[in-house]
Image (cartoon, coloured by chain):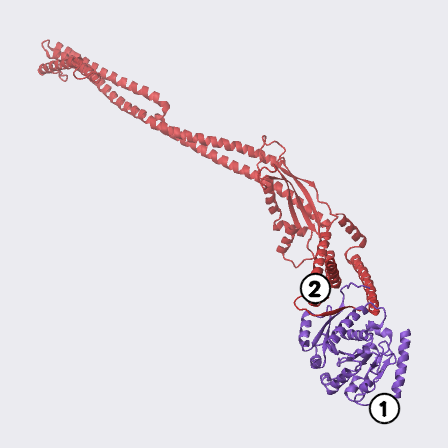
Amino acid sequence: MERIKEAIRLAKEHRQTQALTPGSSSPMPVSAEQKPRPNGRGVALDFDLLPTRKSHLAENRIVVASRGNPHIAAFDMLRTKVVLEMNANGWQVALMTSPTAGCGKTVSIINLALSISRQPDQNVVLIDLDLRKPRVISYIGVSPKYELQDVLNGEVALSQALFGVDIGGPQLAFLANKRPLEQPVEALVSRQMQDILATLRSSMPRPIVLIDMPPVLMSDDVIAFLPQVDCCLLAVAEGQSTLKEIQNSEKLLSGTNQLGCVLTKSTEKVQTYY
Amino acid sequence: MDLVKRLDLLYFAQVAKRRLAFFLVPFLTFLVVGIGIIMVVPKVYNSSAKILVESQQIPDSFVKATVTAMAAERLEILKQRVLTRENLLNLVDKFSLFQNRKSVSKSEIVDLMRDRINFENLDIGLGAGKKGKGNDRLTVAFAVGFNSESPTMAAKVANELVTIVLEEDARNRTSAASETTKFLSREASRLADELSKMDATLADFKSKNSAMLPEKLQFSMALLERQNREIEDLDRTIANAADQKRLIELEAKIKQGTNDPGGAVVASGSVLEQQLAKLQLAYTQNSAIYSETHPEMRALRTQIKTIQKQIAEASASAQDAKPIDTSNPNLSADMQLAAEKLRTIDQSVEEAKKRQQDLARAAEETKKNIEGTAAVTANLESLLRRRATLQASSDEIESKLSQAKLGEQLEEDQQAERFSVIEAPVVPTEPVSPKRLQLVMLAFAAALGAGGASAFGTEFFDHTIRRGRNITSGSHRTNLLVSVPYIKLESEVKKRNLKAIYMLLLAILALAVGLLIIHLFITPLDLFIYSVRSALKI
């Protein structure tokens, strides 16, 4: 409860700061508005923290948000492996896809992002690029003022579209669409998209950029976007994905570095230490 | 290793849990449908009678039964006779069976009846382990029964069947026995006919060859001897007559003129002739005994020559002598008397000669008869032999006939092997089929099989990933970062519990409805429970 109160307080504080600087609409506003945090963790992207409901998160399997959940261990393990691997290779942008729909990649990536953001001095930006079926916003249950589409249209600055959530804290930023998009591939390969990624890559301190994408076997979105990322994760679901699908997916993803697979919906009993 | 094994076991437990629905759905479907069908199948009751084949009561050595075919063979024949189309259709009419199957043809009804009637031989082994298996089994009893949906009908028809079987057997046996008798009496009369014919032939033959019969041989021989003797006698008579005649002529001549030498000459001539004849006879007789050069023979020859010479001299002198002229009226009375005597002698000689000729013919006849006797005897013997054979077979047939008549009497009095009903058909209380417990067990096994096949089939054809090992080992390896367990939501758990409750309620409802249906349409539940209990006891 204390944490929530703390978050709400922080959110209110941010809204006040935002209100103090209303006219900042330069092309690269984020880097311009970087400023040192008072707790000494370094410069973070500046965005609002939106309030979330715990029950809503739990309903959508965002388990990392609730303390003591036994599933957190799995995501922490994933987080450690991913961060280590990416840092070791100097990779910054990772996309998450799956062979087919319903493999739990959105749930996994939100949990992963939350888990990463809990590491000290590690910023994370989660972009929902499943443009045909954006679901990140509905999963975390917030209603940001602006969305990704607005940035792509050049209507608002990136910093305005970025938003945080109270349970994620200031180290975790989201960039997502509320509504589905008709022509996603064009948006994915657009200049604006490249600009967004460039901005995020160059912001300090270096954030890890996680991108949620549609299933690789269902559309050409992933293949089109693949050159812009450093590495990829594949979510496969037990009792749903077949070995053949995984093989095909990995073939399609061979253009980039592969971090590995996340097996979701596992019913296998895992020996736990705790 | 232990851990891996435990994990494997856990994995299989997981598989079982995952495929439970795939197992349960076909399993329950098969089970319910199977049991439903078993319950709906009509009950069939069987009522049957046990009939004992009793062996002959009177010992075999006293009276032999005419019907000696093996009981099993006779049973088979009996079965064929009982299960004729006519009998079966009569049964159908009598008990108005198959009323609900009007459209079925008669042949089909006959087939149905044959299916429902059961004949069963109850054998016992004789001399077990001694010989082969089939031959030394003895049928001592058999069962006749009938299957029907109605227990009372089953009993009724079975009763009727028993009656038919008994009647048919009795008729069979008596008819077989009287057949035998008929055959034997026919044969006997035929033989008697032949015998009388043979007797006639024999009599005919005897009458035809009466003179040549062997028993007449003695008589014929005696006859021939007598005849020969008589002929010899006559010879002698004739010779005497000739002597007498010469004597009379000599007397006459003497009386005519004593100088007439002719008479003596004639007389001596005739004596000489007689001597000659005697000598000749002796010679002939001796020639059979002695050779030509024997002194006896030579003496005889010399005597014969001498006498012949004397005869020739005598006849030469007799040429001069005049015969007595009887016709001469001038003859004296003596002469006439002599002539008369001569005539009488001539007459008697004539008669004797005639008689001799007759006798010779008769002797010839007798000789022939004697010669023919051998052939006749042979023929007669063969005829007699044939008759004896006929007589023997006729006797045999007669004795057999009397035995057969006795056997027939035995059959008519039911003293020979007979059938006796030791268990009359009763109204059955328990159906013989369907064997519900077995069928239910069968349905259960089938359901188990179907469920297993379904579960294994789905597992087999499911190529989805089931555990981390699927992608970290094997043909395609990939870097598995982490396995995230399925994140169960409370709402999901609640929903599932709710669903389970609904299903339970539904199952209870279905059970209730099922029981109600069974109670109303198939069998009242108390009876059903009773039958289940009794089935379980078995």
Residue A55, compared with residue B336, is above or below; it is below
Residue at mark 1 = A23
Q: CA distance from mark 2 to mark 1?
A: 63 Å
Q: Colour of chain A?
A: purple
Q: Position of residue B92 (x, y in %)?
A: 66, 52
Visible residue check, residue B466: no
Q: Pointer 2 indicates a residue of which chain? A: B
Residue at mark 2 = B459
Residue sitting nearer the eye, A181 or B9: B9
Residue sitting nearer the eye, A105 or B140: A105
Q: Which chain appears red? A: B
Visible residue check, residue A262: yes
Residue A2, compared with residue B254, is above or below; it is below
Q: Position of residue B295 (x, y in %)?
A: 16, 13
In this image, A51 relative to B276: left or right?
right
Q: Quadrant of residue B26?
A: bottom right
Q: Pointer 1 indicates a residue of which chain? A: A
Q: Quadrant of residue B64?
A: top right
Q: Hey, what amino acid is under mark 2? A: Glu
Q: Hey, what amino acid is under mark 1? A: Gly
In this image, A136 relative to B169: left or right?
right
Residue beneath the point at 45% across and 32% down: B196
To the question of a shared chain for discs 2 and 1, the answer is no
Numbered disc in front, either 2 or 1: 1
